[in-house]
Image (cartoon, helix red, strand yellow):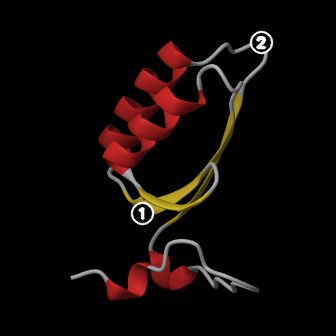
């Protein structure tokens, strides 16, 4: 499935969350990641994320789609991490 993950994490934990998310997804811009994940990998990511988070303060929002082709994406302004050039 295709995932867009957005997080709002306290500054003290944001570095750990950034490092974790980069292991599973492509960084798009500040606190935003996207990419293909299996259901098992998503559960694994969320398990690790919950160990970093303070669930009474921090949050993660996940948007899912069957495939990237079902998602229309429009960027206005500078695209911070263009994935079109990846090999």
Q: Which mark is residue 6?
A: none
Alpha-carbon span between mark 1 and mark 2:
27 Å
User: Dot 2: what SS?
Assistant: loop
Q: Quadrant of the C terminus?
A: bottom left
Asked whether residue 81 appears in the rendered view, the answer is yes
Identify the residue at horizontal 48%, vertical 80% (top origin).
82
Task: Please tell me how crowded label 1 is: few (under 14), some (14-19), or many (20+) other residues with Cα within 10 Å.
Answer: some
Residue 67: give x, y in percent of width and height: 44, 73
17 displayed left or right of 23 = right
Asked whether residue 4 appears in the rendered view, the answer is no
Q: How many marks?
A: 2
Identify the residue at horizontal 67%, vertical 13% (top origin).
54
Which residue is situated farthest in the left direction here? 87
Q: Quadrant of the N terminus?
A: bottom left
28 displayed left or right of 9 = left
Task: Please tell me how crowded label 2 is: few (under 14), some (14-19), or many (20+) other residues with Cα within 10 Å.
Answer: few
Identify the residue at horizontal 49%, vertical 39% (top origin).
18
Residue 43: give x, y in percent of width and height: 40, 33
User: Dot 1: what SS?
Assistant: strand
Which residue in the structure is indicated by mark 2?
56
Q: Nearer the viewer, residue 25 or 31?
A: 31
Task: Classify 81 as above or below 44.
Answer: below
Identify the residue at horizontal 35%, vertical 31% (top origin).
44
Residue 25: give x, y in percent of width and height: 40, 54
Q: Nearer the viewer, residue 42 or 25?
A: 25
* Mark with earlier residue (1, 2): 1
Cβ atoms under marks 1 and 2 closer than 8 Å: no
Which residue in the structure is indicated by mark 1?
35
């Amino acid at each position: 499935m295709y995932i867009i993950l957005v997080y709002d994490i306290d500054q003290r934990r944001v570095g750990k969350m950034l490092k974790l998310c980069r292991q599973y997804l492509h960084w798009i811009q500040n606190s935003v990641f996207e990419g293909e994940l299996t259901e098992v990998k998503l559960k694994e990511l969320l398990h690790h994320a919950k160990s970093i988070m303070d669930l009474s303060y921090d949050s993660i929002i996940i948007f899912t789609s069957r495939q990237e082709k079902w998602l229309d994406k429009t960027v206005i302004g500078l695209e911070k991490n263009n994935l079109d050039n990846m090999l």
